[in-house]
Amino acid sequence: MARTHLADVLVVTQAAFAAERAKLQTLKKRESDLRAQLAQLIQARDDRAQGGDEIADAALTAGADVRWHHWIAGRRTTINNELLQVIAQQGRQLTAVRRSFGKTEAVKELVKRDAASRAVIAARRTRDVPG
C-alpha cells in the first residue's frame, strides 16, 4: 500500500473509533439520566412517607396517595427496564469501541512499519548511488 493510502486508512479508522466512543458516551449519559430519575422518584416517595401534613392525610383519605404510590412503582419499573436495555447496549457498544480501537492501532502499526521500510529503502538507495 502506498504511504498516502495508509495515511487515509488511518484517518478513517481514527474517525470510526471516535464515532464509536461518542456513541458509548451517549449511552453513558442516558444511563446517568435514568439513574437520576430513579433517585428522584425514590426521594419523592421517601419524602412523602415522612410527611404528616393535612394535605397528605386528605390525599390518603381520598385514595390519591395509593394511586400515587402505584404510579411511582410503575414508573420505577419502566425506568429500570429502560436502564437494563441501556446497560445491555453499552456492553455491545463497548465491544464495538474495542474492535475499532484495535483496527486503529493495527493501522498505526502498519503506518509505522511502512515508514521504517521506506527509510531503509531510501538509505539503501543513497548508499548505492555511485559518486
Image (cartoon, helix red, strand yellow):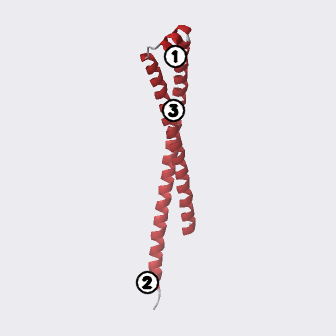
Which residue is the site of mark 2?
127
Q: Secondary structure at mark 1?
A: helix
Badges 2 and 1: C-beta atoms under 8 Å apart? no
Residue found at x 50% / y 14%: 55
- Above or below residue 64? Residue 84 is below
Which residue is the site of mark 1?
69
Q: Mark 3: give few (<14), some (14-19) or many (20+) Cα within 10 Å.
A: some
* Residue 3 coordinates in the image, percent (x, y): 54, 68
Specify which label sits upstream in the sequence, 3 or 2: 3
Looking at the rendered image, the disc whose residue lies closer to the viewer, 3 or 1, is 1
Nearest the eye: 129 or 20 = 20
* Residue 112 coordinates in the image, percent (x, y): 46, 65
Please, what is the three-letter code of the amino acid marked with disc 3?
Leu
Residue found at x 53% / y 27%: 79
Tally the marks. Answer: 3
Please, what is the three-letter code of the amino acid marked with disc 2?
Arg
* Residue 70 coordinates in the image, percent (x, y): 54, 16
Residue found at x 49% / y 67%: 114
Nearest the eye: 111 or 45 = 45
Q: Secondary structure at mark 2?
A: helix
Nearest the eye: 6 or 41 = 41
Q: Mark 2: give few (<14), some (14-19) or many (20+) Cα within 10 Å.
A: few
Please, what is the three-letter code of the amino acid marked with disc 1?
His
- Above or below residue 5? Residue 87 is above
Q: Mark 1: give few (<14), some (14-19) or many (20+) Cα within 10 Å.
A: few
Answer yes or no: is residue 2 visible. Answer: no
Measure the alpha-carbon separation of dots 3 and 2: 66 Å
Q: In which quadrant of the rendered image does the C terminus lie?
A: bottom left
In the picture, the disc for residue 34 is 3
Answer yes or no: is residue 16 visible. Answer: yes
